[in-house]
Amino acid sequence: MLRESRRGSFVDKKMKIDILVAEIGSTTTVVNGFTNIDTDAPVFVGQGHAPTSVNEGDVRIGLQGAIDSLSQNLDMGGITYHKMLAASSAAGGLRMTVHGLVYDMTVRAGKEAALGAGANIHMTTAGVLRQIDLEEIEEINPNLILLAGGTDYGERDTAVRNAELLSQLNTKAPVIYCGNVENQKVIQRIFEKANRQIYITENVYPKLDQLNIEPVRELIHQAFEEHITEAPGMKHLREMVNGTIMPTPGAVMECAKMLYKEIGDVAVVDVGGATTDVHCVSDGSEEIALIQTSPEPQAKRTVEGDLGVYVNARTLAQMVGIEKLKKETGVEVEEVLEDYQPIPVTKEQLILTSSLTWYAASMALKRHAGRFYYVYGASGRRAYAEGKDMTKVRWLVATGGALTRLPGRGEILERLTNINESGEMLYPKPYQMKVLEDRHYIMAALGVLCRDYPEDAAILIKSDFGIISNEQDNVKI
């Protein structure tokens, strides 16, 4: 299938592109073009941008504008493409609620699966849902609801009761069940009787201290793709996108996992206008695994909703300290924030944005990484570890507008390799990590591409990061 984009009057100078990958953000839609797909030499040809048009009620306007922008950037009179894939965080992204039996067990496991799939989690509950919980779920109006509860062949009643309550909600959000395997048939019957969409998969927490994240993540992506067109402004998305659709953070995670296969343990930092995301793919060390208090997924994502450098700039500045920022940057912070822009337009805005980017990234990494703690008893002091073990991470990857476009970002990234001076974090010792930069800002696009074209995506990701050799012990940049 071929589709065409033309700008101005007809010009018989069109470029054939194999794959377009759109990234539909809350404010901007980006389209990335790739050619020579299914060969040994796939090529990233360029990028186009346009304002996202979800608020106008039709996502196609922004998509077409981004395609036309790509055509103009390539100095072409139009573009023909065989296939379009997409990642989306527009229309609120993937809004989910998570419900399980015990917070530190099934709820936490479900939350890890949802975050790793790229969800924005708006609510978590443990135990039987209360009336006020049900009312809050309806107010949130999630895209998906995740229901867990009970290890396999363990407690059954809570998940069944919650299924009965969720099946009667006015919201028509599909439900994913990933709890006690013994409940699968009865829960399937409950939702089918209520004429509600239900997805059934393996238990996310099948045994005590065992996580089973990947089957749930895959099913979340499937459900997102099947139901994204029901989100406001996205109704006509399938008229242009004829391939895979993923949540944008989930696509970044897919790319991070591919990087892990190519070069070893990685951490990805994405400082955005509203949030800062950290994705880490690492098995950690065997020594720390012996003293960890609870299991952690190999691929973990955290999202910090208070650490954005535009939407949350004032909140972040207050967290750091206005006077401290003023002393460090030499700018009148309050005055700059009065006319602050999403993309800095003055020297003072640029200086402040760089400083806020450093603080957002460093604070997000410190929250993401686990820590050592000590317990004193009759036999003396014993060390334990809690949270994600990042000690074996050797590559710090920068993506997102701030960390790939700001002048001075190299210095920020080098400083981020040196934030564990105290040794209390489960994080590499100073200067043990090397830095990689998503030079073309296409990690999300490559994450979508790798679902259908993994070999092409692997070649393109090495090209984007300037990786010459992919021997994990001797990577050349």
Image (cartoon, rainbow, N blue to C red):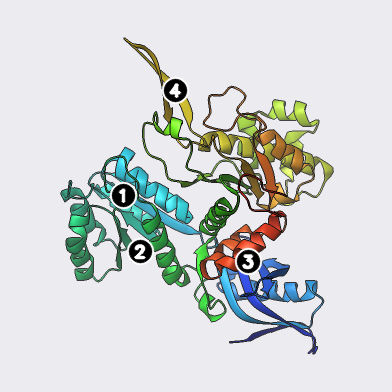
Give, as a three-letter code, the residue at label 3: Thr
Identify the residue shown where x is 74% and y is 34%: 333
Which tag is nearer the camera, tag 1 or tag 3?
1
Badge 1 element: strand
Give, as a three-letter code, the residue at label 4: Tyr
Give, as a three-letter code, the residue at label 1: His
Nearer to us in this view, 364 or 300: 300
Identify the residue shown where x is 63% and y is 30%: 419
| Residue of label 3 | 52
Badge 3 element: loop
Please rate how many residues cluster around mark 4, counting C-alpha atoms within 10 Å: few if below 14, some from 14 to 19, many from 20.
Answer: few
Spatial CA distance of label 3 from label 2 is 24 Å
| Residue of label 4 | 373
Spatial CA distance of label 1 from label 3 is 32 Å
Q: Which mark is residue 173?
A: 2
Badge 4 element: strand
